[in-house]
Image (cartoon, rainbow, N blue to C red):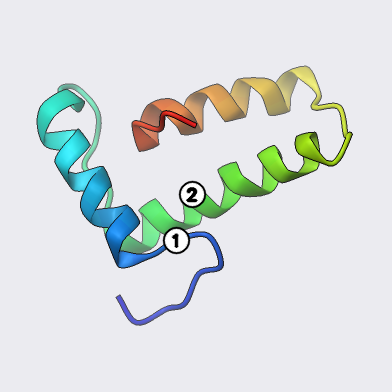
Amino acid sequence: MSRRFLYCSERDYERYLDRHAWEGEGLPLLEWDEFCRLQEELMSLLADQASGGRLTAGQQQRVRELRRLLLSDI
């Protein structure tokens, strides 16, 4: 867990591991770096949208995929 990420912390990953244990049946268990890379991608897309940008249909689909993989409630 040495690489620094803007939108990812050890606590985020620990919460993800707990959610995966309870709700992640059928989903891959992401390693730290992969979890953080996907979390960064999701946050970047959501930040673009929050700043008034419109997501393309492909980007909207990617947000749904990322939320599912990350077991995200945001």
Task: Give the residue pinned by disc 2.
Answer: 39
The location of residue 57, given as percent across then percent down, is 76, 17
Kindly identify which numbered label has been placed on residue 40. none
Circle 2 — which element?
helix
Residue drawn at (80%, 27%) of the image: 55
The count of marks equals 2
Q: Amino acid at mark 2?
A: Gln
Q: Residue at x 29, y 60 (%)?
A: 11
* Residue 18 figure quarter: top left
| Label pair 2/1, CB-CB below 8 angstroms | yes
Q: Is residue 61 above or below residue 9?
A: above
**Could you tell me residue 41's position as x and y percent?**
59, 48
| Left or right, residue 44 beside residue 24 | right
| Residue at disc 1, secondary structure | loop
Residue ID at (26%, 44%): 16
Nearest to N terminus: mark 2 or mark 1: 1
| Left or right: 29 as drawn, with respect to 32 | left
In depth, the one of 19 and 63 nearer the eye is: 19
Above or below 30: residue 28: above
> Viewed as shown, does residue 67 lie left or right of 14?
right
Q: Identify the residue at the far left of this view.
A: 21
Report x, y in % for residue 46. Answer: 67, 38
Label 2 – label 1 distance at C-alpha: 7 Å
Amino acid type at image mark 1: Cys
Q: Residue at x 60, y 28 (%)?
A: 62
**Circle 1 Cα neighbour tier, 10 Å, few/some/many (<14 / 14–19 / ≥20):** some
The residue wearing badge 1 is: 8
Q: Position of residue 1 (x, y in %)?
A: 30, 75
